[in-house]
Every structure is written in structure tokens, then in C-alpha cells.
Image (cartoon, rainbow, N blue to C red):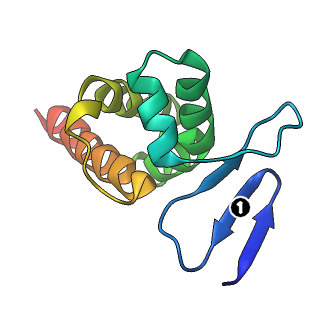
């Protein structure tokens, strides 16, 4: 089991879920599934942790696809709004992949609206 640590994120080769260290010096590790469960229970801090963990990656992906900063910010925000709205139906193992699929579909919709 090989782990690589970048800032506060821990990426482990043999696991599909990220683990996060709580910011206030606590040693407890939280996986995406645990964070999602806490969000279901109304924990706003867990929601902030999920969003802040993936926001930059989703934004950069949208910027790559659209080439427009303003559009990328709007689409990134819509990605997280859709995730929150449909969180109950989330059944994937890889949250980042799921969010990137939502982002790709929203970018595609953006281009279709632009053509019209």
C-alpha cells in the first residue's frame, strides 16, 4: 500500500476514495462516503469540506473545456448544486469522477445553448 501526501489530502493506491484530515489538528480521517453521510445528516461543515476538496479540480476541468473563466465559475457552481440536489441517488465509488461527468454534461449543454 503506497500513499502519497499532498498538503492535507492523502491519496492511497489501493483505495478509490480520498481521505481527508480534519483541519483543526484532529487525526481522524474522513472518506468521501463518510462526508456524504454527514451531509445527509445536515452537517454543513462536511458539505464545505467536500466542495472545497473538489472545487479547484472541477473548475480547471470546466475552464479547459470552455476556455472562459466566467462560464467555468458558473458551471462549477452548477455542478455542486446538482450534486447536492441529487446526492440521494449517488452510488458511484469515485466522487471526483462523478463530479467530472456532471461537469462534462453541463459544459456540453452550455455549448448547445450557445449554438442556438
As drawn, which residue projects farthest toward the left?
116
Residue 4 falls in which quadrant of the image?
A: bottom right
Front one among 72 and 21: 21
Left or right? Give the position of 100 relative to 29: left
Front one among 93 and 66: 93
The mark tally for this picture is 1
**Residue 95 position (above or below residue 4):** above
Q: Residue at horizontal 30%, vertical 50%?
A: 104
Is residue 56 at all visible to an observer of this figure?
yes
**Residue 85 position (above or below residue 51):** above
Front one among 62 and 93: 93
Residue 19 falls in which quadrant of the image?
A: bottom right
Q: Residue at horizontal 37%, vertical 47%?
A: 99
Left or right? Give the position of 98 relative to 57: left
Is residue 67 at all visible to an observer of this figure?
no
Q: Residue at horizontal 55%, vertical 44%?
A: 54
**Residue 69 in picture, x, y percent from top left:** 53, 35
Task: Identify the residue position indicated by label 1 in the image.
Answer: 10
Left or right? Give the position of 54 relative to 26: left
Q: Residue at horizontal 45%, vertical 15%?
A: 42
As drawn, which residue projects farthest toward the bottom?
1
The local secondary structure at tag 1 comes to: strand
Amino acid at each position: 500500500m503506497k500513499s502519497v501526501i499532498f498538503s492535507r489530502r492523502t491519496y492511497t493506491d489501493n483505495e478509490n476514495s480520498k481521505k481527508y484530515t480534519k483541519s483543526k489538528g484532529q487525526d481522524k480521517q474522513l472518506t468521501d462516503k463518510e462526508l456524504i453521510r454527514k451531509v445527509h445528516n445536515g452537517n454543513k461543515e462536511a458539505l464545505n469540506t467536500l466542495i472545497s476538496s473538489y472545487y479547484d479540480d472541477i473548475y480547471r476541468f470546466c475552464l479547459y473545456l470552455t476556455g472562459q473563466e466566467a462560464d467555468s465559475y458558473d458551471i462549477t457552481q452548477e455542478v455542486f448544486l446538482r450534486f447536492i440536489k441529487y446526492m440521494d441517488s449517488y452510488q458511484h465509488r469515485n466522487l471526483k469522477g462523478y463530479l467530472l461527468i456532471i461537469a462534462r454534461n453541463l459544459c456540453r449543454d452550455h455549448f448547445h445553448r450557445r449554438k442556438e
